Amino acid sequence: MKVDINKFSEISIQAKIAFMEWLGRKAILHLKGASREAALAGLGLIEKWRRDQVVSGEELSLALMNEKDEGIYAYADSQNIVENDAVEVVGGVVSYVAWRVYKYTNKPMPQEYEQAGDDFLQWVLDQFEKLNSLDQIRISNVLNYLYDHYKSPADTLGEVVEISEMDRVANSQN
């Protein structure tokens, strides 16, 4: 599925982050055990940031991989292809949100996040499609809903977008 990056760039930060978290929460259905726990920890930080913006980019970075080689990417070389794809999706989601948080807070950004802009969404969606978790119509429905309801000037935080709201839109009949 090709996403219109220009349209995606025109929605609020909250809408972008909520959409990415929504994809990550669909991907964790393919994870078990320790990889699932690491993914849930990263997604929990994203949810907390959406609620009160107290999570730092560094905390999100550490959820990906810390100095003890623990975190989401510790499971990236799984022998199970589906698990590996799910780890890539969740890792991509957390990377994108870390980039957004660094940018929003004007904190110095590690070099590895320089390429995690809005166009990074396409890479995450390409990885997500490998999981066959949702059809393109559901994803398009959610994106179109966000484009219609959460358009805002560049880099505006905006109001919190609920994950359940996106689930409702994804599951509605056109």
Image (spheres, rainbow, N blue to C red):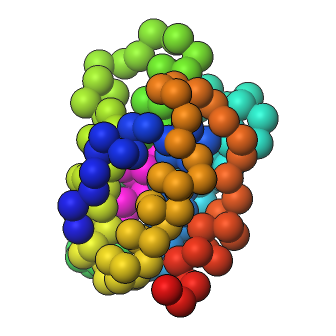
Residue 21 seen anywhere in this rendered image of the structure: yes
| Outermost residue toward the bottom in this view | 173
Residue at point 37% right, 18% down?
110
- Residue appearing at x 53%, y 62% in the figure: 145
Give x and y (percent) for residue 36: 53, 68
Queried whether the magenta region covers residue 122, the answer comes back as no
Q: Position of residue 24 (x, y in %)?
A: 48, 62
Which residue occupies 44% across, 61% down? 143
- Above or below — where is 106 with respect to 137? above
Residue 62 in the image: above or below residue 88? above
| Image quarter of residue 53 | top right
Considering depth in this image, is 134 or 165 the residue closer to the camera? 165
41 and 156: which is toward the camera: 156
Q: Is residue 88 visible?
A: no
Find residue 99 and report its image quarter.
top left
Check the image and name the residue furthest to the right.
52
| Residue 90 % position (x, y) | 43, 57
Q: Is residue 89 magenta?
A: yes
Question: Image check: 138 left or right of 124?
Answer: right
> Foreground residue, 65 or 114?
114
89 displayed left or right of 12? left
Residue, x 55% and y 21% (percent of image)? 104
In the rendered image of this protein, does residue 39 appear above or below residue 84?
Answer: above
Residue 56 place in picture, x, y as percent: 61, 26
Q: Quadrant of residue 95?
A: top left
Is the stretch drawn in magenta largely helix, strand or loop? helix
Quadrant where the N terminus is found in the figure: bottom left
Give the side of residue 141 with respect to residue 5, left or right.
Answer: right
Please give the range of residues in magenta: 86-95
Tally the numbered discs: 0
